[in-house]
Image (cartoon, coloured by chain):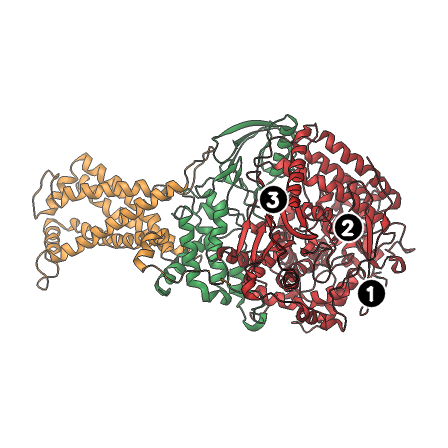
Chain colours: A orange, B green, C red
Amino acid sequence: MALATRTDRRPSITRTLWDSTVGKKTVMAVSGLIMLAYLVVHMLGNVKVFFGADEFNAYGHWLRHMGEPFLHSHWGLWAARIVLLASVVAHAVSAYQLSRRDIKARPVKYAHKRRRAGYATRTMRWGGVIVGLFIVWHILDLTTLTVNERAWAGHPYENVLATFSTWYGNTIYIVAMAAVALHVRHGFWSAAQTLGVGNARRDKALKFLANALALVLFAGFVSVPVAVMTGVVS
Amino acid sequence: MKLTLRVWRQKNADAPGTMATYEVDGISQDMSFLEMLDTLNEDLILRGEDPVAFDHDCREGICGACSLVINGDAHGPERTTTCQLHMRSFADGDTIDVEPWRAAAFPVVKDLVVDRGAFDRIIQAGGYITAPTGSAPEAHATAVPKAAADHAFEHAECIGCGACVAACPNGSAMLFTSAKVNHLGVLPQGSPERETRVLDMVARMDEEGFGGCTLTGECATACPKGIPLPSIAAMNKEWLRATRKAKR
Amino acid sequence: MSTYTEYTTGEPLADTKAPAGPIAERWDRRRFEAKLVNPANRRKHTVIVVGTGLAGGAAGATLAEQGYHVVQFCYSDSPRRAHSIAAQGGINAAKNYRNDGDSVHRLFYDTVKGGDFRARESNVHRLAQISVEIIDQCVAQGVPFAREYGGLLDTRSFGGVQVSRTFYARGQTGQQLLLGAYQALSRQIAAGNVEMHARTEMLDLIVVDGRARGIVARDLVTGEISTHFADAVVLATGGYGNVFYLSTNAMNSNATAVWRAHRRGAYFGNPCFTQIHPTCIPRTGDHQSKLTLMSESLRNDGRIWVPKAKGDTRPAADIPEDERDYYLERIYPSFGNLVPRDIASRAAKNVCDEGRGVGPGGQGVYLDFADAIRRMGKDKVAEKYGNLFDMYERITAENPYEVPMRIYPAVHYTMGGLWVDYDLQTTVPGLFAIGEANFSDHGANRLGASALMQGLADGYFVLPSTINDYLARNPQAGDVDDTHPEAVSVLRETRERIERLLAVDGDRTPDSFHREIGELMWEYCGMARTDAGLRKALARIPEIREEFWRRIKVPGTGAELNQSLEKANRIVDYLELAELMCLDALHRAESCGGHFREESQTPDGEAARRDEAFSYAAAWEFVGTGTAPVLHKEDLVFEYVHPTQRSYA
């Protein structure tokens, strides 16, 4: 009498996570939240630009010397960079694999077309790609200074001003921040669902928080190029 | 009413399909959508053509057999099953598109009929409580809080029609799977198998080729029984809990 | 073309399986006397189960749990869709949780009396005994029955019964119970103990050396016709209400399996016993494909009426109170709107026949909640009946809070079915029939909330015990396979029938014939039957049958998914079964339960049973299409519940 119907051996937690759509979504949620937390900090740092070149450049200096004297110079910064890089890679690889799977799961489209779901939901994939490309440009522009016109190492204030004094610099940045905001708006709520935090009672609060985060991030980040363009910061 | 129908016709699983156009006349507002298709089929038979194949059985909204995408909506414009959709939801002269459920895991069998065997296999993977006949304790031995019983019932209402998968842009079966996981997981009778159930059902769901969930909410909007979207979050929570706790 | 209205009477039939002795001990004794199959040997036995409803699903799962190899079939794409799923009201069980005087004996008594003394006492008592175990079993499976705030199970009174013994899951009890059985079955499918064939329809029975040894089935997707063999065959294929075309049955519910089994030697019990449910939504026109039931519980608070005047077409609201006839309250002052189903149905037919019906075609009566809304408030009414009101509004586009509902009786359940003994074995050894497919424990009329009870009792508890005895006493009599002459000939006959259906290429659709036979049956073998009417139907049915084979048009081929072919093939069997139903109704010149013969009524128009002549179950033996069948009578002996005339005035 074969009554036992389940296998007793289970794969490791990592295996279970990575092999499952639910697990991969968890990876995306956790990495996304890490990046979101970073964005909030990053945005707070950015608005220091309003307090003048000295304060802003000193902040940049501190970032490179975080944790000293316990840590060696740049170690803190690199630690953050490694965590972020890992998050980006995990987020992107999961997204890529899940998207491929999703597209494969619906190979034939309906002949009758109609608009579906909210704007943020539908733009998660393309929005994600845009944000990814922006990160590359952003690093080349203000970290490695490869594409920055001023490219004055150790003087981020001047470099930022240089970026936002070109029309394309502003355009790229503002479009990217819009993409980030939309991405955060659906992504934050979505991460809450994936991590099982969402339920009917909390739904309103979560959606409010997601919208608030998106809005605050967008406003905070975009305030800088706007200030440069309007001459408030020069 | 006079209507123009554009209906997906496909001879069998391997044949290519196409949208064919038919005119139907003399349609009453009181007809159900399926009775309207019956009328079309009677005409087709008498004209010597192959009638349109579609799944249907109880025609009272509970068996879950009927499965048509009408003008791009699973089960059509009302929040109900196709069999309970009536022609008064349409206007004279309308053109109506009728298509089968579309998902890789639900291959078309013929015309508007698809194979939903994947749902059965998800249930077989763990959507049950092990209680062989005769082994049950007295029903009142375990009290079940009313809230838990109601929560279980709300999810047990799922009729397995597959509208959630059909509506999902990713062809995901998360809402279906979460309905059963929620139903059984909340009951004391179902708790000994909580971890294995959710892990095995989700694994099976993935193996069947359903897509992942991007929380677009289309599934819950299409669900004729109102299985709510937060059920998916609850299943995610259950799954994460099980990943930590399951014995290895 | 031959017609028949006469029949011959054969040897009387008796159930030899129920032990004698005190009725409360019979089931225990039978289980003890039954031979068992050694657990190690069970896997060598194959049992075919046809159907996956409450009875079939429960039986398949339980037999597999016991260790048998089960091969199971259903015509749907999934075993979860069987029509048991549509049952609304609830399931009876003699738990006496309410301490309101209920007991196994009272449930037994109510069921025998409710069935108008046309059921076998031993079977009914066993059903009442098992009812308590069913609830335990279902709760353990996770069936979400309604509960009280304390966490214990809620019950309600149902169908005019004076005790609250009905367990329910809102208006979806059938669905929840079926999903419980389906999940148990799914577990066994996963374990490899059940080989499930979905979208496969049984078309014939293979009988070898007088024993049921297999079936012929058609894969509905590929059209392939194949044979399947086993040591025993269990039919759990439901009732035959779809003979009437319009009924509350599912569109694909059909009688082919039982009728084919009947043709192969299984006697058909009480075919004329059909139940007409009083509260269904009336038809709206000729396009109507099926009827939808509204739960009987509506009669607890709704008042049924029609206008006093004939042909009164004013809207309900414009008809003043003194021009309304609350006919049930008038004729049956003590039971009022809560009279049993058969009485309520017939009364509705009578007022409509008088020309006082309402709605399109005058085929409806009002079920009015205006008083209830005044008395309890709209919110309270919505709380109690909201989902039913919503369903009504969806179908009719009328708001029952504002205008009275319109209802009309519809065919709902068939008490008749294959004759079975106490072991649920038909007259073909090795062929068992369970659930609505057998002639069951309901006699001439089924009580509300008893169908689910019987289906699950048969499937979970009775059959899995009694089939052991058959399998133990009949070790495999040599292997039967495709090459056996019986298998070859049944397979050939099935193929020929399919080919013949496709070859006619006439000018009428399957549905047109189904509608025609259905209307004929509703007219002459429906709520009220007469000698003359039944004779008319018996003369007409062979003509329709002849016309069918001349004019049927089935498009397409047999080697594909062909829903027209499926329908046409089922109609072939309805056209024969209908004739037997009419003959049975004609021969039973008494009124009992759902069978009302106008010639047999009391002076005030109530059903008059004639125990002296008809206290038996009629089991019909098939002789040939168009040939008078042979009647075998099983005398009914009442040792515990003494027949009385029902009275509801």
The Cα atoms of the two marked residues, 3 and 1, are separated by: 46 Å
* Residue C539 picture quarter: top right
What residue does disc 3 label?
Answer: C483
Residue at 58%, 61% (x, y): give it: C62
Quadrant containing the N terminus of chain C is top right
Both labels 2 and 1 in a single chain:
yes
Work out which residue is located at the far top of the displayed protein and give it: B47
* Residue C246 picture quarter: top right
- Closest to the observer: A208 or B137? B137
Chain at numbered mark 3: C
Which amino acid type is marked by label 1?
Val
Q: Which of marks 3 and 1 is in front?
A: 3
Q: Which of marks 3 and 1 is nearer the N terminus?
A: 3
Instruction: Give coordinates of residue A86: x percent, y percent.
Output: 22, 52
Which amino acid type is marked by label 2?
Pro
How many neighbours does mark 2 have within 10 angstroms: few (below 14), some (14-19), or many (20 or more)? Answer: many
- Closest to the observer: C200 or C244? C200
Q: Nearer the viewer, mark 2 or mark 3?
A: 3
Label 2, secondary structure: give it. loop
Give the number of marks.
Answer: 3
Label 1, secondary structure: give it. loop
What residue does disc 2 label?
Answer: C271
